[in-house]
Image (spheres, grey):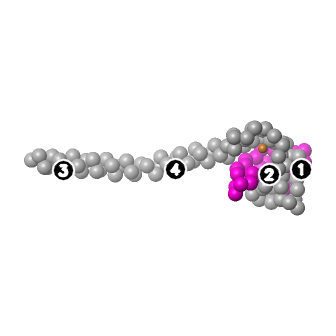
């Protein structure tokens, strides 16, 4: 009798464990979505220079929270060279950036109308 009770308890524990595992991926996906949302937070900037030949963009940017970077003027790589034709010096823009292979890189950019 005691063995049956133990077995029942064990199977209950196992099924609870399985249920917990099933919900884990959903929780993880939600966390990752939240992380990538904060990563893509837009930062305001003014375009200072567009260097099509070098594939670089000089931005006077505000605080970039995901890079823990204070406001400054600096040169960025661009993820897509098409960005260089979408903006020009003097434009007010919003952009996202990350450090890719050690280089600060603009991931997305849009002109503020
Ligand atoms: Cu900077």
Is 83 left, or right, of 65 in this rendering? right
Q: Which residue is mark 1?
A: 49
Which of the two labelled residues, at mark 4 and mark 1, occupies the earlier sequence position?
Answer: 4
Q: Residues within 10 Å of mark 2 (few under 14, many from 20)?
A: some
| Distance of label 1 from label 3 (alpha carbons) | 72 Å
Per the model, the C-alpha gap separating discs 4 and 1 is 39 Å
**Which image quadrant shows ligand 1?**
top right
Rounded to the nearest angstrom, the CA distance separating label 2 from label 4 is 30 Å
Tell whether label 2 touches label 3 (CB within 8 Å): no
Using the image, tell me which numbered label, if any, was put on residue 7. Answer: 3
Label located before the other in sequence (2 or 4): 4
SS type, badge 4 = helix
Label 3 SS: helix
- Range drawn in magenta: 84-111
Check whether the beta carbons of the residues at disc 3 and disc 4 lie within 8 A of each other: no
In the image, what residue occupies the spot 78% across and 56% down?
78
**Residue to which mark 2 is pinned:** 76
Residue in view at x 79 percent, y 48 percent: 110
């Amino acid at each position: 009798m005691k063995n049956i009770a133990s077995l029942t308890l064990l199977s209950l524990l196992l099924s609870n464990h399985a249920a917990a595992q099933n919900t884990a991926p959903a929780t993880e996906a939600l966390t990752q979505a939240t992380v990538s949302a904060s990563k893509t937070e837009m930062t305001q900037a003014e375009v200072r220079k567009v260097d099509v030949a070098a594939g670089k963009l000089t931005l006077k940017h505000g605080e970039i929270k995901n890079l823990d970077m204070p406001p400054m003027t600096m040169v960025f790589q661009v993820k897509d060279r098409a960005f260089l034709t979408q903006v020009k010096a003097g434009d007010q823009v919003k952009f996202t950036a990350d450090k890719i292979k050690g280089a600060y890189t603009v991931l997305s950019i849009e002109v503020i109308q």
